[in-house]
Amino acid sequence: MHKELIKEAIDSLDLIDIHLFSASVKRFEDIDSEHFPEEMSQQNKISVSAEFLEPVDKGAGPKLIHAKVEFSLRFIVEDEDAEVTNLAEIDACFIAKYHQNNDVSDEAISEFMKFNVIHNVWPFWREYAFRTAAQAKLPTPMISLYKPNNKG
């Protein structure tokens, strides 16, 4: 995490919205919150991408950045031959919208995407995953506090 670059982006961006874009829950085996294999574990995945939208009138108004953050968790069982069986999964994609008020370097935007966007959306993902698992009667997922990779 490069704090100077993140500060450059923070000084030029305003968060205007976070919303759920798409979501799904799938069950591949008959498991529920009370009956699941003891050896079951959870795998997590995060993906971030951004779309930069220019103002309609090139000289007027701020640019918009739509950051798409995709989260996924799977409940799995791995056998002794490292064969993985997928029991259930929860997926969600959120859009975080930002106004870009000033020019920002590509490096600053990149650092912002790696840390701040995920940090902004993480509580929405955690709430969605917990609520969806409860409604689907799946085991309660482990969604810890977001811990970025602290390099730099």
Image: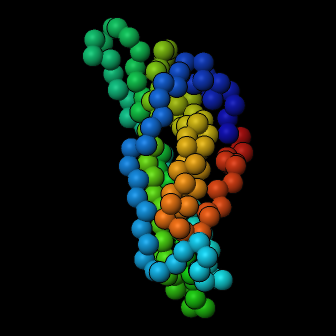
- Residue 106 percent location from the top left of the image: 50, 30
Q: Compared with residue 109, is residue 103 higher up or lower down, i.e. above or below?
A: above
User: Which quadrant of the rendered structure holds the C terminus?
Assistant: top right
- Residue 82 percent location from the top left of the image: 56, 85
Quarter of the figure with residue 61? top left
- Residue 132 percent location from the top left of the image: 51, 57
Q: Compared with residue 103, is residue 77 higher up or lower down, i.e. above or below?
A: below
Instruction: Please tell me which residue is depicted at 60% across the width and 18% down the height of the picture.
Output: 11
Q: Compared with residue 74, is residue 12 higher up or lower down, i.e. above or below?
A: above
149 relative position to 71: left or right: right
In this figure, what is the number of numbered marks?
0
Instruction: Please tell me which residue is depicted at 45% across the width and 58% down the height of the picture.
Output: 91
- Residue 143 percent location from the top left of the image: 64, 56
Instruction: Please state which of residues 128 and 66 is positioned toward the viewer in this rendering.
Output: 128
For the view shown, which residue lies furthest in the bottom direction? 80
Quarter of the figure with residue 116? top right
| Colouring scheme, one of rainbow, by chain, secondary structure, one colour | rainbow
For the view shown, which residue lies furthest in the left direction? 56
Instruction: Please state which of residues 130 and 45 is positioned toward the viewer in this rendering.
Output: 130
Q: Compared with residue 102, is residue 29 higher up or lower down, i.e. above or below?
A: below
Instruction: Please tell me which residue is depicted at 58% across the width and 36% down the height of the picture.
Output: 120
User: Which quadrant of the rendered structure holds the N terminus?
Assistant: top right
For the view shown, which residue lies furthest in the top direction? 59
Instruction: Please tell me which residue is depicted at 55% across the width and 61% down the height of the picture.
Output: 134
Residue 36 visible within the image:
yes
Residue 45 visible within the image:
no
